[in-house]
Image: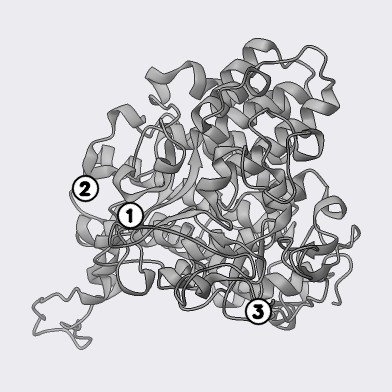
Amino acid sequence: MKLNKLFSILSLVTITSFMSCNTLDPIPTDRFTDETFWQSVENSEIMVNMAYNQMYSADKMWNDEALSDNLFEGRSNTAQRAIRNGIADPTLGRFADEWKQAYEGLKTCHVYMANIDRVPNMDANLKARRIAEVRFIRAYIYFRLVNFYGDVPFFTEDITLAESSTIGRTAKATIIQFIHDELDAISNILPSRNALPAADNGRITKGAVEAFHARVYLYESNWNKVVEHTEKLINNKGTYGNYDLFPTYAGLFTAANEYNQEVILDFGYVPSVKTWSKFYDAAPLSAGARLNAIAPLQSLVDNYITLNGLPIANDASYNENNPYVNRDPRMAATIVYHGAQWQNFNGNTSTIYIRPGTGSNQTERMDVYVNAASNSTSTGYYMKKYYDVTATDNYNSGLNIIMIRYADVLLMYAEAKNELAKLTNEDWNLTIRKIRERAGFTNAAALNYSTSWTQDQLRTLIRNERRSELALEGLRYYDIIRWKAGKQYLDGEVRGARFENNNSTYIRLDTRKFDENRDYLWSVPRSQMDINKNLLPNNPGYAN
């Protein structure tokens, strides 16, 4: 989204104004005040862009992904690692930071809505659109809050410091209903993707509202409503926008193809102004990375089916000694495995050697697995999805982060239809088959619907398809939580590639612990409970 250019100049803007000779309270001429800031549309736009900036980020996506069974942070005991290992307590920094950032974003939204009517000569249609965008952002922030903490302090206008120290927690269900009401109210105010000028790329649209609405209902397992809102995007393209799958899976995550027809909502970066640099500690060392701090896990690699459409455990052609051939092409677009190809910044392509004992020279051996504490990969893999070949020094990337895309809409639709026991061959062809064809599958066994599949078998297939299609996009943790499948996916030994003991056994990393009575929610931050006793009692399993 191009909004960050305007947001970035907030600290650079100064104004000049004259002072009345009769006032005893002179207006500063070197900075904005509450009296002067809201006197221009341009300044009000800065506040909208600030709200966009606080809605999401690359850091949030990667940190969310590290909460799942897809990634491992091996360099230190990060907050995400502490949560997954069952040792987090109310003093954990991530608990406090997520809370703080959310309420900072909510304050921006509330201040904007309280003051926008003060802006003189603002076009009425523009004002209505911007208010709708800010209401969407507020709803999005509240949705993150309730998914992490459950019941949280809830208000719809700016509150005082004193009020913030006494307000209690509102039931999650009440806040979710507010989100639905807000999305219903703003949908018709916003333009469709088709009506959005290029200069507004990245702004919230009618299609983003419907896709987010479907996601909220998905997390509630309200399957009929998921179908209702996804069908609006599938069947009413003239009203909500002409969305479709981008022709190539890997191309979807490149700077050259930003704002393509699959992207429903993204979080924008501008290379000259605002960047992110996660790959500096995630890419192969031979490609210029500093070290490896986060890497894919074996369970994610194992999730990718073979080109025959079968899980690796069910395919007789699968060779454990040569495990990366004849596999779902999305694996190669997402993960760097031993023997994978990497396009360098200079345009050259190199082979990445990770298996111990490989590599013909010092550069090639830089990426080889040594042990879990070395500078190279701790799992036997490196990340690839979202690698930006146009990034500058130290992997500073201006690549947008996709928040919602059309493939997710199709997967939500397929899951909902199956949970309603109504998934048909037509539905399959519209969703799973279409997604797999785009990925590069051609074998009929991988593409065709089988009438012999049970609802349970289809549920497993669709869940695995979500994981493969949406891996490293920040959604896996939330899927596990809404499925109430924490014990299945987030408990037990964490493994890397089969690179230990002369390449005969899998790398053993942490032993994760998931408490079914505690870990579906986070603790209220200790700092907040100390300030405000009305936040008590804490969520189950955490100390007050």
Between circles 2 and 3, the one closer to the viewer is 3
Label 1 residue SS: helix
Say which residue appears at 22% left-offset and 80% top-offset.
31
Q: Which of the two discs, 2 and 3, labels the residue nearer the N terminus?
A: 3
Q: Percent position (x, y) of residue 111?
A: 42, 62
Q: Percent position (x, y) of residue 375?
A: 57, 80
Q: Give me the C-alpha separation between circle 2 and circle 1.
A: 9 Å
According to the image, what is the colour scheme of the structure? one colour
- Three-letter residue code for mark 1: Ile
Q: What number is the disc on residue 122? A: 2
Count residues near mark 1 (Cα–Cα under 10 Å), then give few for <14, some for 14-19, many for 20+. Answer: many
- Three-letter residue code for mark 3: Gly
**Residue highlighted by disc 1:** 116
Quadrant hosting residue 161? bottom right
Label 3 residue SS: helix
Say which residue appears at 71% left-offset and 38% top-offset.
464
Seen in the picture, residue 390 relative to 177 is either above or below; the reply is: below
- Three-letter residue code for mark 2: Met
